[in-house]
Amino acid sequence: MNKTVTIDFAQAALADAYTPAAASAHPQSLLDLPAGEARESLLAVHSLLGASLPPTPLAIYEAGGGSTSFLPLEVLRRAHVTVVDIDEDQIRNNDYAQETILGDVQTHRFAPGSFDLVICYNVIEHLPDVEAALLRFCESLKQGGLILIGAPNPKSLSGVVTKYSPHWFHVWFYRHVRGDKKAGLPGQAPFPTFFHPLVTLSRLEAFAAAHGLQMIYRREYESPRYPEMRARKPALAALIDAAASVMNFLLPGKFDVRHGDYHVILRKI
């Protein structure tokens, strides 16, 4: 492929995600997502990983992976997973990795060409030096290997609010809007955010092109916080949806400010 492609495998797998057999076919992280664009995109990511990774035992580096995996179970079952995380509680809670390392993904180095897949999911927004982390990922990846990144969109409505609001507000939102009573406790989200410039999708694309990485999947999607709020706090959700519609009308282009997250898959060429 010579250009960025967005391959939507989700429709083929979407019905399966709602069957009784889904619990044995999909990770809990996917099953916990409300119906909507976030789940559709993660299903598409899973299908693309299944089609693109070699059908042999895999070496996977999960950068910042703590207690939750976003990888398809079929991939996990044939993988040796190495997790690096700076949080002792996240390391302690991990129950799927064969190797866990207490360390900093911005500085930790592996031998070149060690992994078939590097996954960095909901992590880069928390790093002060995203470039250093990405360079370590590239170095550790085999030729033809993949990097999967899931991250919030700093230019979205939720991204702007997250970037410019204090951390206590994030904890309040998780506890009182999302209903997560453990939010903010040791080892529990939300974690402090930095939003390094490379978290912005356009800059991440430029970095990839400059460092021999081909973007084979890219999708911005509505944050799962919106369907969660519509179910839990419909009045608040209606106000936010109305505000988002006004912003979408006033802002140039066809950008939807509710597209608060994105998935990207990069191939080392």
Image (cartoon, grey):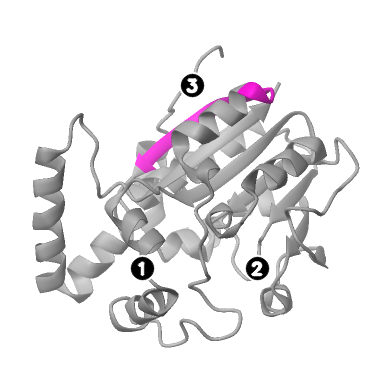
Residue at point 37% right, 46% down? 40
Which mark sits nearer the N-terminus, 3 or 1?
A: 3
> Which element carries disc 1, helix, strand or loop?
loop
3D distance between C-alphas at marks 3 and 1: 33 Å
> Which element carries disc 3, helix, strand or loop?
loop
Q: Position of residue 225 (x, y in %)?
A: 31, 63
Task: Report the magenta residues as a range.
Answer: 210-220
3D distance between C-alphas at marks 2 and 1: 25 Å
Other-residue count near label 2 (Cα within 10 Å), few / some / many at <14 / 14–19 / ≥20 = many
Mark 2 or mark 1, which is nearer to you? Answer: 1
Q: What residue is disc 2 on?
A: 66
Residue at point 65% right, 28% down? 267
Circle 3: residue type: Thr
Tell me, for residue 4, which label it has, or none: 3
Which mark sits nearer the N-terminus, 2 or 3?
A: 3
Quarter in which the C terminus is drawn: top right
Circle 1: residue type: Ser
Q: Position of residue 18 (x, y in %)?
A: 36, 57
User: What is the quadrant of residue 83 in the picture?
Assistant: bottom right
Q: Position of residue 8 (x, y in %)?
A: 40, 32
